[in-house]
Amino acid sequence: MKKILTILKNEVVTLLSRPSFWLTTLGLPVVAALVFGVIGGLNRNQTASLTFSLVLLGPQETRPEGYVDESGLIREIPESVPPGTFLAYPDEASARRALEAGEIAAYYIVPADYIQRGEIRYIRPDFNPLAGDSAQSDLFTWVLKVNLAGGDWRLVNLAQGPLEVEEISLAPAVAPNEDNPATMWVPYTVTLLYYILIIGSATLLLNSISKEKENRIMEVLLTSASSRQLLTGKIIALGLVGLLQTILWGGTTYVLLNLSGRTFNLPSEIRLPPDFLAWGVIFFLLGYAVYASLMAGLGALAPNLREASQVTFVILLPLIVPLFFSNNVFASDPHGALATGLSLFPLSAPVAMMARLSMGGVAWWQPPLSALLLAATAVLIVRAVAGMFRAQVMLSGQPIKIKTYVQALMGKI
């Protein structure tokens, strides 16, 4: 155990000391946070929205705008609106004269049937296709909504801002609606996400093994630790780093949604189980252990990283197969024989089971069984790959072939 911890610590320190790792882990989330967080925050604040518009469009005209309220809905202008921003006129003729005299930049007409039609006319002397989306137009719309709400501007802000709603459904699970594109894309998105996360983390181990073999460091390490200790330490270390990276990206996504004032709502047909995230962590770690071990064996046999990359597709094929069936099987028939078989087969289970869980309605015993089979497979593959580190000394410099890899994995070399 002491040697495993030493290898684990060394791998973590080595990986965390690479600038490329931090550029990927923190660079993209920081840039995304700066862009989406600022824009999202401005979208929730009408006054800040005016500043944003000044940055994008340049100095804008800040003269007052007029309005003609034929509906009689506007009884007051909220105190938070700067005085003189909107000037009331009794009819359109007087508003037009003020516009022609340069007293106002434009004016609005709230028709008498606004409640029925929900339309407002905006008149200005020049052609400006962006005027309808300007911050001042949004502010006038907000003023109208405040008056519709009886002057309660807090109620209006709450109604058009993000709401956290806890939904508890007592109805039975609803079958997926194949006519709803969002419903069909949920399993594909989950499948692709888990494929990227697992392969991204497993590839770190392939790179590490390949570089240490090319530098002859592997032979030195095997003189002080057994192949199983070496492999176990590396898998745990890079798995923890990959999990940390995944949590960081997930947390960044959650923060961005809050800063941007948006919420992510799944289709009503989709009912994620309460333990969806817990199963997500379990299948990520077990799937990573399996494919990281397979990648490590590939790195041990291949003479260099370039040749190892040429065989990677064959090893990842069982994990890629669910991607081809994500829409046709997991979305339309998530509990059919094919979908269930793929979610129980260990090499495809990490992505297939999560795709089924995202659709809801999975039998309670299937995720534990799938995880148990996957864990057993991970133990067997780790033991088999550990033996390949002895084979790699004999096969050093030989081109890598699938037949050679399978024979070494089965202990026949």
Image (tube, rainbow, N blue to C red):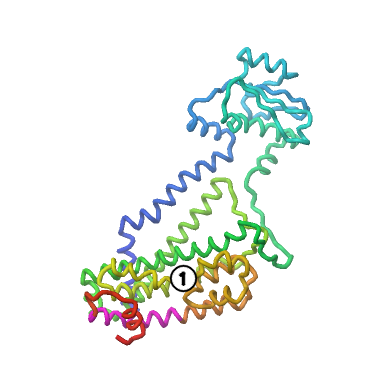
Q: Is residue 13 in sight in this rendering? A: yes
For this orientation, the residue located farthest to the bottom is: 412
Mark 1 belongs to which amino acid?
Answer: Leu
Left or right: where 274 falls relative to 313: right
Is 393 one of the magenta-colored residues? yes
Q: Which residue lies at the image location 55% right of the left edge and 80% below the top edge?
A: 369
Q: Quadrant of the N terminus?
A: bottom left
- Numbered marks: total: 1
Q: Quadrant of the C terminus?
A: bottom left
Q: Is residue 366 above or below residue 140?
A: below
Residue 392 drawn at (x, y percent): 26, 78
Q: Which residue lies at the image location 33% right of the left edge and 76% below the top edge?
A: 297
Q: Nearer the viewer, residue 221 or 364?
A: 364
Crowd class of label 1 (few under 14; some 14 to 19; many from 20; radius 10 Å): many
Q: Look at the image and give the residue range highlighted in magenta.
A: 377-394
Residue 30 drawn at (x, y percent): 43, 49
Question: Which of the 4 image quarters holds residue 391?
Answer: bottom left
SS type, badge 1: helix
Q: Nearer the viewer, residue 312 or 104?
A: 312
- Look at mark 1 in the image and give the residue it sits on: 319
Residue 256 drawn at (x, y percent): 52, 49
Left or right: where 61 falls relative to 91: left
Magenta region, main secondary structure:
helix
Q: Is residue 390 above or below residue 351?
A: below
Q: Which residue lies at the image location 33% right of the left edge and 56% below the top edge?
A: 20
Residue 285 drawn at (x, y percent): 46, 71
Is 92 one of the magenta-colored residues? no
Q: Is residue 89 above or below residue 211?
A: above
Q: Is residue 68 above or below residue 176?
A: above
For this orientation, the residue located farthest to the top is: 101
Q: Is residue 83 in sight in this rendering? A: no
Question: Which of the 4 image quarters holds residue 5?
Answer: bottom left
